[in-house]
Structure formats: C-alpha cells, structure tokens
Image: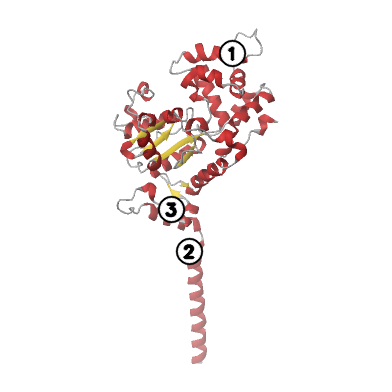
Amino acid sequence: MHHQWLLLATCFWVIFMFMVASKFITLTFKDPDAYSAKQEFLFLTTAPDAGRSLRETHFPEELKLTGKVLPGGRLVQPLVYTQRLELVRNVCREDTLRNLSHTAVSRFVLDRIFVCDKHKILFCQTPKVGNTQWKKVLIVLNGAFPSIEEIPESVVHDHEKNGLPRLSSFSDAEIQKRLKTYFKFFIVRDPFERLISAFKDKFVHNPRFEPWYRHEIAPGIIRKYRRNRTETRGIQFEDFVRYLGDPNHRWLDLQFGDHIIHWVTYVELCAPCEIKYSVIGHHETLEDDAPYILKEAGIDHLVSYPTIPPGITAYNRTKVEHYFLGISKRDIRRLYARFEGDFKLFGYQKPDFLLN
C-alpha cells in the first residue's frame, strides 16, 4: 500500500513538472519578436565606448535582422539601409548603365552639398524631396537659429543668411577630408513623381514668387518643344517631358543655369557612385527614415525632424497616371531613358504602366 501511494505521488510530481515546463516554453517562444525587440532596446540604450561616435557603432547581425526601436515604438530594419547602399554599389558596377550612374564630382555637385562642421555632417540637396525641412535641421545644428519653428521661410533658401556653407566653399584638401570622414546622406523619391512636383512648384503654383521660371524658362521650353504652334496656353507638362527626354537638352540647361537642379537626375546632383554616402533616405518612408538618419548622425538628442502629415510622402500612382495621360509613349520612353539610372540605383520600379 505504501508503494502504491509513493508511485501515485511520483506520477503527480511528474505531471506537475511537465505542466510547469510547458508553461515556461509557451511564455518563452510565444512571441519571438517581442524578445528580439526587448534585446534591441537594451542594446540601443547602452552607452557606446568612450570616444566612439554613434555612427561608428556597428549593429550585430542578429539585431540587423530584428530592427531597431524608434520613438513611438516603430521598428525600422537597419538592414534596409544596408541593402540600399549595396544596391547603389552594384548598379554603379554595371557597365551598361555607366553613362547614367556616374558623374564627375564637379563644382555643380559640390554646390549641392551643405556642411555642418560642428557635427561633421554633409547633406546633398535633392530638390522636391522635402529638402527644405532638412535645411532647417542643419540651420539649427549650425547655431543660426535656436529652433526650427523660429526660422523664417525667407531665410531657409537665402544662402547668405541661413548659415549653411556649401562644400564647394572649402579648399580641395578640406573637401576631401570632409568627404572621407563626415556622415553623408541624401533623400530620394520616385523620379517621375519628383518631376511632377517640380513642374507644379515652379511652373504652376510658384509659391516663392520666382518669376523667371514662368517668364524665362517656360517660354524657352515652349519655343523648342511645343508641337502645336497655335497653342497659346502656358507651359504644359507635356512640353516639360519632351524637354527633359531630349538627348540634346543640355544646350537649354546651360541657358537655365542652376535652376535646373529641380529636375536633373539624382546622379547629376549627388554623384552617388563617386561619393560613399552613409545613408540614403527615401521620401516614401521618411516617417521612419528621418529619425533613423538623426540617430545615425548622432544628433537625435539635439533636433527633431518636423512633423510629417500622415500619407503625404506616400507614392501616388493615380497622380502620376493623371499627369502622363495623353503624352506619347515615345516621349515617356525617352524620359525614362534619361532617368533610368535613378530608377535602378535607388530601387524604384520601372513604370511599365506608362511605358507599354
């Protein structure tokens, strides 16, 4: 009888231990992402080694896969940014695209790059991709104004007042030093949607009252590229597309001067195959990319990117289709041929719905 009770007690003990173990296993493996996120948070809040900047801190492979925690609890995959840079390197090696992906680091390119020596940052300006806000961030970092809210709009693009030196203003040796050692970034968006934004901003709305776009540049484009000579309306998007897609567009570009920065390729603006950038942000994912860039640059505790209205940076295919409606396939294909390098370098899908 004693042995029976002993055997029964042993069975109950085994069953009890099994239930405890099962519960432990369930708690441990029920949500693997939660564990990874918790580990990531601990890693990100650990102070880096003394004398080592945040941008020099490398993410362990397992953390690259699980992502990092940003304000608001969103997870951003650092692997995404690595893949963007790797894509640029791979496309830069393609001989068939060399004419569309490579450019000299000329005075034109150096004029596009703004410098923040205090925090060792270089920002390449790509107009019509939210650059005004990034300029405000750098203006604050350079100490010209105490906060973004206090910067007058008239000052942001006035390079004599905004306190933003261009890389071209330094000596050759100083330029090379900054290119090699500073944190470097720029932002891109779908190339065709950017052209639509440029057309609307400069030739339709013109909010900054820059009359030369309508009264000098637009007539020059119309004279050369309008097919219907009896048409008396102002410049149309079709005229703009025909100008940009013309292989001989450069003779007009020379007449227009630096105003062409609003519609030339990212390659021509920032030389991504010649300059090794630290981060390439995308306008479509700016809500995540902006805080990531600030953190990687080591300045997220000093300044914040202005609030982004929900949905404003999302790609709008309906808008793209509307603007290209009625434009000949030949003209659209010529336009794509010019901007193909931008599409491939930065992973934007070829707009077959416009081309075929």
Q: From mark 2 to mark 3, how far is it between C-alphas?
A: 24 Å
Which of the colour schemes (rainbow, by chain, secondary structure, one colour) is used? secondary structure
Q: From mark 3 to mark 1, how far is it between C-alphas?
A: 53 Å
- Residue 82, above or below 160: below
The residue wearing badge 3 is: 59
Residue 334 drawn at (x, y percent): 64, 26
Eye-nearest disc, 3 or 1: 1
Q: Earlier in the sequence, mark 3 or mark 1?
A: 3
Looking at the rendered structure, the secondary structure element under dot 2 is: helix
Residue 3 drawn at (x, y percent): 50, 91
Q: Are marks 3 and 1 in contact (CB under 8 Å)?
A: no
Location of residue 149 by image quarter: top left
Residue 61 tag number: none
Query: Amino acid under label 3?
Result: Phe
Eye-nearest disc, 2 or 3: 3
Query: Amino acid under label 2?
Result: Thr
The residue wearing badge 2 is: 28
Picture quarter with the C terminus: top right
Residue 341 in view of the camera: no
Q: Earlier in the sequence, mark 2 or mark 1?
A: 2
Eye-nearest disc, 2 or 1: 1
Q: Which one is nearer the viewer's eye here, 7 or 66?
A: 66
Residue at horizontal 60 percent and vertical 28 percent from the top: 320
Looking at the rendered structure, the secondary structure element under dot 3 is: loop
Residue 44 drawn at (x, y percent): 38, 52
The residue wearing badge 1 is: 222
Crowd around label 1: few <14 · some 14–19 · many ≥20 (10 Å): many
Q: Earlier in the sequence, mark 2 or mark 3?
A: 2
Left or right relative to 163: residue 97: right
Looking at the rendered structure, the secondary structure element under dot 1 is: helix
